Amino acid sequence: MKNFEVTPVQIFRSTLCLFALFSLSVLSVAQTKEDQAKPAAAQTTQMAQEQKKLPLSERKTVTLGDLNIEITTDTRIIATMAALNAAGFDFEPGNRALAPLRQQLREDLKNINPSLARRLHDHFTKHSQGRNDASAVAPYLSLALTLTAPPTFSIDTPVDKLPEDVREITDFALLLEEFYRDTKFSTLMPKYKQAHDLAMKSYAVSTASAAANVIQYLHTEPILELPPAYVPRVLAGGRIANEGVKAQNRVRRFVVMPDLLNASNAVNLRVVRDTYYVFLGANVDPHTAIRRAFLRFTIDPLVDRGIREVAEIGPDLRKLRDSRGEKLAPEYKNSNAYFLIADSITRAVDVRLESLENMLVRKFDSDKAFVKALEEENERAIYELSFAYDRGAVLAYHFYDQMKQAENVGIDAKQYLLSLLQNIKFDLEAARLNDYAQRIERYKTTREMAAKTSPDLSAAISNADQAIITKLNEADRLIRAEQYNEARTILKEVLQQKSNNARAFFGLAEIGSKSAARMKPEEQSRRDEELYAAIQYYKDAADNASQETEKWLIQRSYVAAARILDFLGQGDDAIAAYNLAVKLGDIPNGAYQEAVKALKDKETAKQKP
């Protein structure tokens, strides 16, 4: 009789299943600030308070508000970034052209007073310390959050309470007030506020799924309150000084904001008192950026509790950090041990979550294929973490290994996280890059070769502003994760705003095709309805795609529709669709070879007796 054992593959598959189920179950979290403001019709205030006493896993519903998460926009941020653009901040990764919204801003501000523009430029140049990337504007974002609303922009926080990099630029508030008044930016604000509001509304699902994945992986709930920073002093006789003042717990908040006047792909995480703000530039994948930021939000207070454990490894940790020499990133040079530990854990878990999410959306026909994919993901993790390690997150590999071992146990991270600081072998950590050098180089070579041969789908998306692009990217991610209902909702929202957006039609067609493939034989009637609808969506995609930038989409739409027509027994119509695809020629990222092969196979089949 054969002995059956639970293999690591089976354990990991189980982990993936639980991970997916939890992520799906808390997508009900996805509510914007406006949604949260609506009263629950069937739930009294008392019932809501009782619900909040329960652990997240025992609640009937979970909202972003339950996690102190808010998605919003801020006119102070918009005005500050407009002023920095006027100051000459023009960074775009890869020297690309400015995003359309930033180009529009330049046009709107072309008549700015030259003297004001020069003073803005001089201030930014002086304090950016030679940097002209997204990191150069980070202190200005923190400053904006300490100001009163336009048009006054007064600092409402004691200067000595501000971070050092913000204290150095407080005089910018006066320039900002002058900029807002002199350019009459109040008349421009509605236009730019609207663009940011549209982007904000597209972040809900990404925020929910990112937070859910973090909570599930760590098996914990984020700490949302901390003890008060000030405790009333007890005088002789038990009398309390300032008896009328009761010390309040500090409430921790996590805020997501669009930052569309920053560089494309810019992500900034700024912590102001007990609130974590994550700013998302144009073209940012919101799920990935929010996931990493929410990890920091969750992990920081867990590390802060380990005063003894952190103190014990502090000297060795700083020595290891300093070994990076000139490669050390600025934010690590004077950082304390708490930051180094929290950042290393964050980067390790983030890379691991990326692997889990990648595995979830892939299909495997055997355990062998599954194991091969796992090995590939591990090699990718080693490669990705090498950059974090080089910059200063020198315990990233240690925590990656340790967290992998803990993930199948299902223990709350609060119970074991600090124990991971007690078994660090600093001689091993110092040798990590040398030990992994060949594997890192091998993965790098493989990655570069794949980049040369794989399709580049980053061509300009026609008939779409930044908010639409963000929604399309999110819908694409949801389709890969087989969350078809959520993706369909987003794509239909896109078509309400842009009724002839080809990528939205193509996405709906893909959802219909994939949904039909999962239906049972007894559901043939409903399956055929889905397929005919998909054919129409593919036709709409081909009809509305740009001939300049989306010809590949037209060709793919013809071929995908032809495959469905073939399946439905409409061979002549399928041949016509394949021929339309072939007439377009061999287009990069298209489906030319597939169409040619299909026509050849049909011709061969016709010649058989």
Image (cartoon, rainbow, N blue to C red):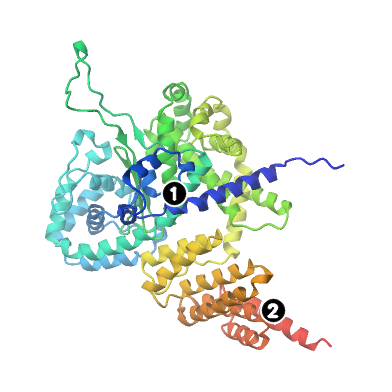
Counting residues from the N terminus, which is met first, the one under dot 1 or under dot 2? 1
- Nearer the observer: mark 1 or 2; the answer is 1
Up-down relation of residue 22 to residue 281 (above or below): above
At mark 2, the secondary structure is helix
> Residue 29, position in %: x, y?
42, 51
At mark 1, the secondary structure is loop
Instruction: Determine which residue is flagged by label 2.
Output: 597
Quadrant (top left, top right, bottom left, bottom right) of the N terminus: top right
Say whether residue 1 is left or right of residue 544: right
Residue type at mark 1: give it: Thr
Q: Residue at x 69, y 49 (%)?
A: 371
Furthest residue toward top: 237
Q: Quadrant of residue 191?
A: bottom left
Q: How far, Cα to Cα, is label 1 from label 2?
A: 51 Å
Q: Nearer the viewer, residue 431 or 461?
A: 461
Q: Residue at x 29, y 66 (%)?
A: 103
Q: Nearer the viewer, residue 314 or 185?
A: 185
> Residue 129, position in %: x, y?
29, 45
> Residue 225, position in %: x, y?
35, 35
Say whether residue 57 is left or right of residue 85: right
Q: Residue at x 23, y 34 (%)?
A: 161
| Mark 2 Cα-neighbour bin, 10 Å: few <14, some 14–19, many ≥20 | few
Instruction: Determine which residue is flagged by label 1.
Output: 61
